[in-house]
Image (spheres, coloured by chain):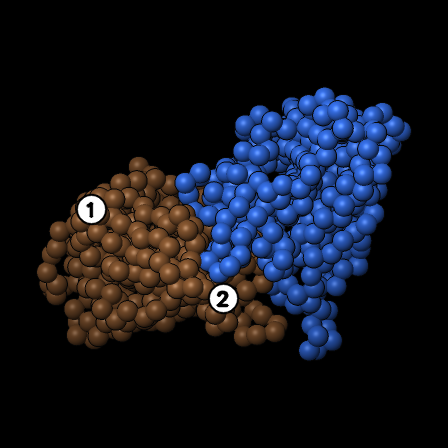
Chain colours: A blue, B brown
């Protein structure tokens, strides 16, 4: 059943509503609950296809549903509808306002309503799609403060990579940090690229979601194979590659491959002169899990991230 | 005065990104002043440009102390202002959330690092920021309450108010916060406006800076008169919020003194024109901040009163 979890009248003849679709078995189920949220950033769409796939599978196999599944495809509906990353009209990143303030501005009020509605979930999954600049291998990102609870869950999410990163002050205002602090285990999935859909990644994460639902006794047992992810907890293993000059970046490697030290990942080109301004080579052997998708770069723009470890692609 | 290049990034599609500064005097690094950091901070760059003009004249008249160095940087972000965009053109990041910066990081982190290297050694730092919500302010000095804040020195500006703000996690990456951590006495000066030019406010801010320069021995002779400031915490302000969205019609102005129950603003139905809400003052006080957009969303703090 589709219901509104937050509603705010806009100035001119329109109401902003954040909606969810709740799936429960006919008998009400066992009370266990998973919440799948996405669309905090209006330019990240990969989670839309995941929501569709999850809803489709439940509709086709209603007898297998044992608990509650709440789907929230659009936490920032105005952003999705206007191809805007943040909240339109506020120029504000919605994932920097949690847990919100009940009597605060509209954005802060919406944040509190979202948090309130998610409380009580046995697991929350927040699906992101990097941004319009970078393509990411399917991965779960975990703040080290919550790794004991979250890493075992992330291992079943059918992602390639689990990145446990250090606590950062800015991350305190994310939805995931707020929910984990309130005792709702919340995983953040990053995969694909902004403004596009990657159907194979949607299928991959959907399988992971149903595996997690089995673990939580929300879905009947069925054979679902999941990948064993590479887990990184050491920040020194992650190598960031930034553009040394401004220009046009042409990637030469696809994300998800193993690169050798010195191997060319891409090049920064000058379209005026036909010259290669810089060849971008891997500083170390490892897994290329992030690669620049948007070609125009400024000096400093992130081009790639490599996990410096002997792993199989 | 010497014009000098503070930071540069070569660009391929448009002119190079350049930050220029104007240096007065030499010797002890006494004062650094930063104008606009975002592309819509027109009043901030205007005030800074008028300050450069004023200091140039004072220097020519021999009224600036030559042993004290003053650096003025009118804009840290000309390339956003030239295309009327608030944040960084390609990735929409905010330079004032990147301090102290990182020389090997992303573009705006590099800009912050490059600039901070040139400005972190000054004894005093002044910045002309803007608020994240659109509106007009009572002119004031704002300081982060880090334990390093120098309130007594802030009184030297002679602005009517000094606001002490308890920093939130995201404030720790602002210039003001990092200046304080690096032992610069840092002050954020708010005039009335951001996107509209206000001549009176610009001149008031310049007078305040000259007053501060007198207090710190940068001006050889007195050119202004001292004024008293009221110090308060941002938590003392009382917010007035509408319950409904619509057209916002104000009935008061910033700096106006209002009494409890006084009508402050109407919210009108945007299609039918009827008054759907009246906002009244919950306390006696001064209008310290006022929303200045035609439309308003429900629950926005449209007015902040200082009791």
Let me know if residue B189 appears in the view: no
Disc nearest the viewer among 2 and 1: 1
Q: Which residue lies furthest to the top in this view?
A: A30
Is residue B197 visible from the viewing direction of this image?
yes
Q: Residue A190 carries which label?
A: none
Position of residue B116 measured from the top left corner of the image (x, y, whole percent):
42, 54
Which residue is depicted at the point 30% across and 56% down? B265
Q: Mark 2 lies on which chain?
A: B
Tell me if label 2 and label 1 are in contact, CB under 8 Å.
no
Label 2, label 1: how many angstroms apart (C-alpha)?
39 Å
Q: How many labels does the image show?
A: 2
Q: Is mark 1 on a helix, strand or loop?
A: loop
Residue at the image point whose x is 35% and y is 53% from the top: B277
Question: To which residue does mark 2 refer?
Answer: B85
Q: Residue B260: give its label.
A: 1
Q: Mark 1 lies on which chain?
A: B
In the foreground, B184 or A167: A167
- Residue farthest along the right direction in this orientation: A223
- Helix, strand or loop at disc 2? loop
Query: Hey, which quadrant is residue B1 in on the image?
Result: bottom left
Query: Does B64 sit above or below residue B177?
Result: below
């Amino acid at each position: 059943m589709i219901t509104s979890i937050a509603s705010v009248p806009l100035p001119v003849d329109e109401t902003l509503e954040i909606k969810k679709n709740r799936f429960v078995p006919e008998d009400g189920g066992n009370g266990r609950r998973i919440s799948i949220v996405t669309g905090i950033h209006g330019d990240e769409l990969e989670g839309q296809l995941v929501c569709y796939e999850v809803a489709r599978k439940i509709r086709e196999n209603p007898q297998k549903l044992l608990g509650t599944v709440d789907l929230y495809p659009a936490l920032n509906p105005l952003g999705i509808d206007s191809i805007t990353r943040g909240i339109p009209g506020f120029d504000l990143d919605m994932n920097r306002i949690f847990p919100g303030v009940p009597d605060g501005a509209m954005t802060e009020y919406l944040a509190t309503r979202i948090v309130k509605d998610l409380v009580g979930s046995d697991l929350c999954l927040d699906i992101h799609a990097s941004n319009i600049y970078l393509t990411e291998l399917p991965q779960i990102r975990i703040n080290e403060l919550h790794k004991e609870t979250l890493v075992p869950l992330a291992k079943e999410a059918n992602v390639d990579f689990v990145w446990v990163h250090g606590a950062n002050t800015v991350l305190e205002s994310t939805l995931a940090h707020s929910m984990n602090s309130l005792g709702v285990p919340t995983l953040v999935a990053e995969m694909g690229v902004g403004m596009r859909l990657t159907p194979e990644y949607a299928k991959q994460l959907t399988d992971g979601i149903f595996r997690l639902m089995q673990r939580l006794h929300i879905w009947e047992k069925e054979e679902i194979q999941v990948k064993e992810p590479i887990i990184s907890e050491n920040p020194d293993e992650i190598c960031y590659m930034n553009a040394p000059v401004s220009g046009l970046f042409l990637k030469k490697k696809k994300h998800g491959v193993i690169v050798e030290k010195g191997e060319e990942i891409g090049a920064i080109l000058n379209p005026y002169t036909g010259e290669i301004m810089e060849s971008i080579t891997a500083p170390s052997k490892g897994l290329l899990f992030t690669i620049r998708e948007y070609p125009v770069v400024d000096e400093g723009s992130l081009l790639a991230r490599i996990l410096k470890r002997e792993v199989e692609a | 005065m010497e014009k000098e290049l503070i930071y540069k990034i070569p660009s391929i599609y448009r002119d190079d990104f350049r930050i220029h500064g104007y240096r007065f005097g030499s010797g002890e690094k006494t004062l650094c002043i930063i104008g606009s950091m975002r592309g819509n901070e027109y009043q901030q760059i205007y005030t800074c440009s008028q300050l450069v003009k004023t200091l140039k004249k004072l220097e020519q008249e021999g009224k600036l102390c030559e042993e004290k160095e003053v650096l003025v940087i009118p804009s840290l972000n000309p390339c956003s202002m030239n295309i009327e965009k608030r944040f960084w053109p390609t990735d929409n990041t905010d330079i004032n959330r990147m301090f102290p910066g990182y020389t090997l990081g992303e573009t705006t982190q590099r800009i912050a690092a490059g600039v901070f290297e040139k400005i972190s050694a000054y004894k005093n730092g002044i910045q002309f920021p803007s608020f994240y919500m659109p509106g007009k302010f009572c002119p004031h000095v704002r300081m982060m309450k880090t334990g390093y804040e120098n309130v007594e020195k802030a009184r030297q500006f002679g602005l009517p108010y000094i606001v002490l703000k308890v920093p939130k996690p995201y404030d720790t990456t602002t210039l003001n916060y990092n200046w304080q951590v690096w032992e610069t006495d840092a002050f954020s000066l708010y005039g009335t406006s951001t996107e509209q030019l206000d001549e009176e406010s610009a001149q008031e801010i310049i007078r305040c800076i000259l007053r501060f320069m007198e207090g710190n021995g940068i001006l050889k002779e007195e050119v202004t008169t001292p004024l008293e400031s009221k110090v308060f915490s941002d938590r003392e302000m009382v917010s007035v919020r509408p319950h409904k969205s619509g057209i916002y019609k104000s009935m008061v102005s910033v700096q106006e003194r209002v009494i409890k129950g006084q009508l402050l603003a109407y919210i009108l139905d945007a299609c039918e024109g009827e008054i759907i809400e009246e906002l009244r003052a919950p306390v006696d006080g001064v209008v310290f901040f006022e929303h200045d957009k035609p439309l308003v969303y429900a629950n926005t703090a449209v007015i902040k009163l200082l009791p």
